[in-house]
Every structure is written in structure tokens, then in C-alpha cells.
Image (spheres, helix red, strand yellow):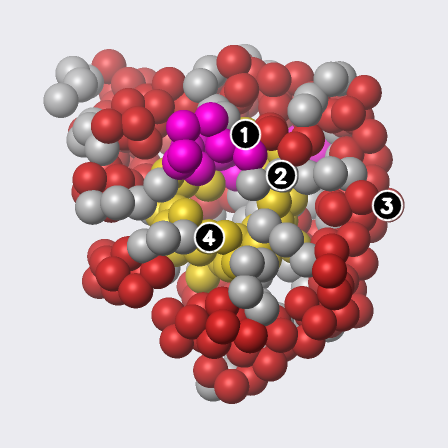
């Protein structure tokens, strides 16, 4: 995995712009990815949770890779790809197209349809996927987001995968929102890139050894996150932005705020089954964001 300073840094969980019909808006995708890089992000992560990745098939992924490649993005340095599938075969296809595009790494969610999985089941699915990929498997960042998947990626599963498939897993994104889980990951797997999804917990985690984040707020105000990731510096403005967002369905809210800061109302489009937030909520969210940004930094 290519790094500039030995740390993972700041990657935006890139929101996917959609047309009114729900198709990916590729010119806006390129423009937004460039805006995030110019704003201080080290990389973009396509097709994560914020990017509505579970709703994007292989054809859409290939076209998005092509659009970013055509715009001159350096995939091995600047582009990661989320993989979200319940079958090993579909996950394998998503991984292969990402590798074929020469993505820097893969943010890999567990199989999510069947709930109540124990560690043996979670480990077995990942292991079968890694076996299917064979020698091409590399630069996997395991994605622990049980509030969405309903499936935990425990430190014990990570340890088993590291033993059975050495060198494949290079990081963990902890989006559990649980400080204790992040601290356990740092204690047991601190040689990996431990990344924190909840921006409100990021500064503290960086001070304890976390290597950065893949996060949604970087779509909106990446410049606030740069010192948090680089120095572990607390910023109450960032916490206020996150608190405002989570009062609404998060993905439509993130996209609405991108529209607010860019003046581009097309960003409110989401792909079914998601729905955009209403006009009144949009106005309240935009006002809350403006208040947060107007506050003084720490």
C-alpha cells in the first residue's frame, strides 16, 4: 500500500452523485473527487456506505473507475474501493474489478444478509473470499460497521485472518462508535492501519495510535479533518457538524450538505430505496452547519 509518511491519512468516503433517475452522475463524481483531494484528502474511497456502494453493481463501478482514470487520478495512490456483498462470488467480482483498476486498497464489509453470525462464520466467509482471490488478494481494510451490516468483525476474527492469510489485511475501519473497541484494536492490532469512522472520536484515537480515517464528513469540510488526522487535534466545529448530520438519515443528509456548501441542488438525489431529506430539514441542517462552521476552533 502506498503511503506518503507511513500513515494511512485522510480518505473521503466519497458520496456518489446521482441523476434524478438514480444513475451515477460521472462528471459530478470526478469534480467532487477532485474537490476532496484539493481540500486535503490523501485519497478517495469509492462505494463505501456514504457512497451507497451496496446499490452499485459491476457496470457502474467499471464506469466510475474509467471516469476517474480518464481524469488523471493515480489509482495506486489516490483511490480505494468499497466492497459490499453477501455472496463470496459477488464480493470476488467486486474485488477483481477494483484490483484490475489498480486501486490502492479495498474496504471490505462482511457478508451482511444473514444476521447473528458468530466468529467462525464471519471468519469462514472472509477466508473463502481470500482463498478465491488467491495471490491477487492484497491491501484489505476490514470494515466493522455493525449498525449497518448487523455483523461484527471482532479482533479475534482479525487475528485468525492475519494468521491464515498473512499480509492480506492491512487495516481495519472501526465504525462501531465504541471507544473501547477502537482501543482494543489498537492494543491487539496496532501494527495495522486502524481507522476510525466516527469523526467525533478521531482525534483521541489518533493520539493513541490510529492512522487516520475513511469518513463521510470529508465530503463536506475536509479542511477541518486535516489537523485532526495529522496531529490528533480536537475541533469542536467538527463534532457539531457530525451531531447535526446524525439527527437525520445520514447518507441523504451528507449529500444535502454537499449541495449546501457547493450550491448544487442536484446533490440531494439519492438512489432507491433511500429518499432525500425534505426542504424544511434541509434548511435546518444547512443552518446548523453554518453555525458550526462559524464557531471558533479549539
Q: Quick check: 111 above or below 2?
A: below
Residue 44 pos. (x, y %): 57, 32
Asked if the residue under mark 2 is in contact with the one under mark 1, i.e. CB atoms within 8 Å, the reply is yes
First along the sequence among labels 1 and 2:
1
The mark that comes first in sequence, 2 or 3, is 3
The quarter of the displayed image where residue 291 is located: top left
Q: Residues within 10 Å of mark 1 (few under 14, many from 20)?
A: many
**In the displayed structure, would residue 210 be above or below residue 258?**
below
User: What residue is drawn where x is 52% and y is 21%?
Assistant: 36
Q: CA distance from mark 2 to mark 3?
A: 20 Å
Residue placed under numbered mark 2 in the picture: 104
- Tell me which secondary structure the magenta stretch mostly adopts: loop
Marked residue nearer the N-terminal end (3 or 1): 1
Q: Which residues are magenta?
A: 2-22
Identify the secondary structure beneath mark 3: helix
Q: Which residue does the numbered mark 1 point to in the structure image? A: 43
* Real-space CA distance between mark 3 and mark 1, rounded to the nearest whole angstrom: 22 Å
Q: Which mark is residue 262?
A: none
- The residue identified by callout 3 is 59
Amino acid at each position: 500500500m502506498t503511503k506518503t509518511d507511513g500513515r494511512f491519512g485522510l480518505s473521503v468516503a466519497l458520496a456518489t452523485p446521482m441523476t434524478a433517475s438514480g444513475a451515477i452522475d460521472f462528471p459530478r463524481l470526478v469534480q467532487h473527487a477532485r474537490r476532496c483531494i484539493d481540500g486535503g484528502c490523501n485519497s478517495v474511497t469509492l462505494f463505501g456506505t456514504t457512497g451507497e456502494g451496496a446499490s452499485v453493481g459491476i457496470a457502474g463501478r467499471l464506469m466510475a473507475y474509467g471516469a476517474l482514470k480518464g481524469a488523471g487520478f493515480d489509482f495506486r495512490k489516490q483511490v480505494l474501493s468499497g466492497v459490499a456483498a453477501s455472496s463470496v462470488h459477488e464480493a470476488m467480482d467486486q474485488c477483481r474489478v477494483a484490483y484490475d483498476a489498480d486501486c490502492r486498497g479495498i474496504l471490505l464489509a462482511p457478508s451482511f444478509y444473514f444476521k447473528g453470525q458468530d466468529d467462525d462464520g464471519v471468519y469462514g466467509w472472509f477466508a473463502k473470499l481470500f482463498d478465491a482471490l488467491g495471490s491477487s488478494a492484497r491491501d484489505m481494510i476490514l470494515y466493522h460497521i455493525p449498525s449497518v451490516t448487523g455483523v461484527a468483525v471482532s479482533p479475534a476474527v482479525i487475528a485468525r485472518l492475519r494468521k491464515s492469510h498473512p499480509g492480506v489485511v492491512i487495516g481495519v475501519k472501526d465504525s462501531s462508535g465504541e471507544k473501547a473497541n477502537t482501543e482494543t484494536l489498537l492494543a491487539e492490532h496496532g501494527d495495522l492501519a486502524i481507522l476510525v469512522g466516527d469523526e467525533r472520536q478521531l482525534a483521541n484515537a489518533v493520539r493513541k495510535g490510529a492512522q487516520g480515517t475513511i469518513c463521510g464528513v470529508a465530503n463536506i469540510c475536509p479542511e477541518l479533518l486535516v489537523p485532526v488526522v495529522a496531529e490528533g487535534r480536537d475541533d469542536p466545529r467538527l463534532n457539531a457538524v457530525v451531531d447535526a448530520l446524525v439527527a437525520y438519515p445520514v447518507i441523504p443528509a451528507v449529500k444535502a450538505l454537499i449541495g449546501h456548501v457547493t450550491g448544487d441542488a442536484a446533490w440531494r438525489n439519492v438512489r432507491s430505496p433511500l429518499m432525500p431529506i425534505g426542504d424544511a430539514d434541509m434548511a435546518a441542517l444547512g443552518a446548523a452547519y453554518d453555525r458550526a462552521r462559524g464557531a471558533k476552533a479549539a
